[in-house]
Image (spheres, helix red, strand yellow):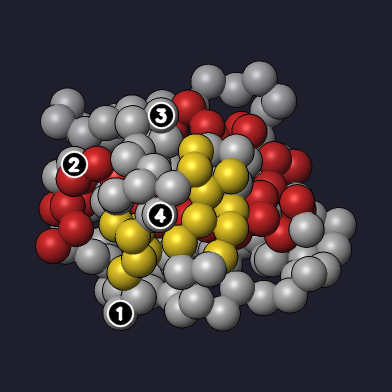
Amino acid sequence: MKKLISVIAVCILFSVVAFAQGHEVGGGAKNIPSHGPSPARVSHPAPAQETRHYNDQPSQPDAPHVHPNGKWIGHDSGPNDPHYHLDHPWEHGHFTGGFGRGHVSRLAGGGPNRFWFGGFYFSVAPYDIGYCNNWLWDADDIVIYEDPDHPG
């Protein structure tokens, strides 16, 4: 169950940063991307102690985000990234709450180790907790997109 929750949380992380705390990353909540990220073009694992930076423009945060034109920044580690590997994807079932721009949900409480909305519970992968330290865990709107590189 923890593995399923971690993978879903990873998907959330890459899709939610644009909506956390009303920031205008990627145009804010009014500019919800029409689709999730494309598969990454790399197939090698990320270095274990890599320092990641995503502020590709001076006005952008140093966190994964989506540009107004739909370009995803920070989703490029590929399917072999050990940080997001699951031995048994969907071991405890699939998330059925809906994916994409037509499924905006509001966080209903918790924190990075356990949060919820719409009757579903999640956690943020430890590798990514630093990117959600300003989320409003009981008020931010989120949208989940399927991750083409990391099943589960």
Q: Whole-Å distance between the Cαs marked 4 and 3?
A: 16 Å
- The residue under label 3 is 133
- Sequence-earlier tag: 1 or 3: 1
Within 10 angstroms of label 2, few (less than 14), some, or many (20 or more) residues? Answer: some
Indicate the position of residue 68 as horizontal and vertical percent values: 17, 57
Question: What is the number of the mark on residue 23?
Answer: 2
* Type of amino acid under label 4: Ala
Indicate the position of residue 142 as horizontal and vertical percent values: 35, 58
Q: Whole-Å distance between the Cαs marked 1 and 4?
A: 19 Å
- The residue under label 1 is 102
- Sequence-earlier tag: 2 or 1: 2
- The residue under label 4 is 108
- In the foreground, 66 or 143: 143
**Rendered residue at 46%/69% (across/down):** 118
| Residue 79 location, quadrant | bottom right
Q: Secondary structure at mark 1?
A: loop
Q: Is residue 106 left or right of residue 31?
A: right
